[in-house]
Image (spheres, grey):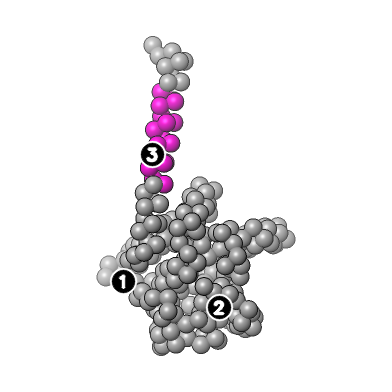
């Protein structure tokens, strides 16, 4: 018959094993972060999930994605995305606490989740490794990966990877594919207005791909006016 001490021993060993497994997983993630600081990712967690969804209806479905280096992405798009998604990108170390506070206040006023306050670094961590779920466990892992990225990549690399892997439509990923899909030009040739319109699609690209109404257009105009003040690496 097992005594309470025996059960406590088993519980202690189980907890230790879980902690060691968690530590091992963080090491695996950190190794991947280090690798991608120098080498471009072929795919991301979001890309793999989207491809799996597309292949449920079309087994031959593929993603539209083409990597381009930082210098071949229009500075207008860089400024537009920073203005729309993370206007303190160069100032914070992964978390915009002022932005988070504003988002919490906005959500409280509206009585629903209307704003997230995530930085570009946080969004990148989620896109590379995680899922769109909103669980606290996922948010905690996102925070850990964000710290890893911010400690090992410079801001130029963070923005370069983000612009190359973010979703811009159903099965459409990265600035190059988006520029060619919506405007028939390369990412390097995007102008200010085009860049602003692409930037405001990012919160919900699959919806705005086919539903780009007056409200979103007005938001794009506001972003375009703010772009001149956006600082990019």
Which residue is label 3 attached to?
A: 21
Q: Residue at x 64, y 83 (%)?
A: 225
Residue density around tag 3, few if under 14, some if 14–19, many if 20 or more, within 10 Å: few
Task: Find residue 40 and report its horizontal and vertical position in percent.
Answer: 35, 67
Residue under numbered circle 1: 62
Quarter of the image for residue 175 reads bottom left
Q: Which mark is residue 80?
A: 2
In magenta segment, residue 13: yes
Q: Is residue 170 visible?
A: no
Q: Going from the N terminus, do you reach mark 1 or mark 2 first?
A: 1
Check whether the beta carbons of the residues at disc 1 and disc 2 lie within 8 A of each other. Answer: no
Assess disc 2: are there few (<14), some (14-19) or many (≥20) residues with their C-alpha within 10 Å of its C-alpha: many
- Residue 23 vs 226, above or below: the answer is above
Q: Residues within 10 Å of mark 1 (few under 14, many from 20)?
A: some
Question: Per the image, is 103 magenta?
Answer: no
Give the alpha-carbon distance from disc 1 to disc 2, as whole Å.
28 Å
Write the residue at 36% across / 52% down.
31
The residues bearing labels 3 and 2 have C-alpha atoms spaced at a distance of 41 Å
The image quadrant of residue 215 is bottom right
What range of the chain is rendered magenta?
A: 10-26
State if disc 1 and disc 3 touch (CB < 8 Å): no
Between marks 3 and 1 in the image, the one whose residue lies nearer the viewer: 3
- Quadrant (top left/top right/bottom left/bottom right) for the N terminus: top left
In-front residue for pair 90/52: 90
User: Label 3 vs label 1: CA separation?
Assistant: 34 Å
Above or below for 46 versus 187: above
Along the line of sight, which residue is nearer the eye, 126 or 111?
Answer: 126
The residue lying at 43 percent from left, 13 percent from top is 3
Residue most extreme to the right: 109
Position of 86 compared to 150: left or right? right
């Amino acid at each position: 018959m097992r005594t309470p001490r025996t059960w406590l021993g088993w519980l202690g060993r189980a907890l230790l094993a879980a902690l060691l497994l968690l530590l091992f997983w963080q090491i695996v993630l950190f190794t991947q972060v280090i690798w991608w600081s120098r080498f471009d990712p072929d795919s991301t967690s979001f890309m793999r999930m989207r491809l799996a969804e597309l292949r449920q209806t079309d087994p031959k479905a593929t993603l539209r994605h083409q990597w381009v280096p930082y210098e071949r992405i229009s500075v207008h798009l860089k400024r537009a995305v920073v203005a729309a998604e993370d206007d303190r990108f160069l100032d914070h170390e992964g978390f915009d606490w002022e932005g988070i506070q504003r988002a919490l206040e906005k959500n409280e006023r509206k009585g629903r989740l209307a704003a997230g306050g995530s930085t570009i670094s946080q969004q990148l961590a989620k896109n590379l490794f995680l899922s769109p779920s909103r669980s606290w466990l996922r948010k905690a892992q996102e925070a850990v990966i964000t710290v890893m990225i911010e400690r090992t990549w410079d801001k130029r690399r963070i923005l370069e990877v983000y612009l190359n892997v973010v979703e811009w439509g159903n099965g459409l990923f990265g600035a190059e594919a988006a520029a060619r899909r919506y405007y028939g030009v390369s990412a390097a040739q995007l102008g200010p207005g085009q860049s602003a319109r692409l930037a405001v699609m990012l919160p919900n690209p699959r919806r705005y791909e086919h539903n780009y109404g007056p409200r979103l257009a007005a938001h794009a105009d506001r972003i375009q006016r703010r772009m001149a003040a956006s600082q990019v690496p």
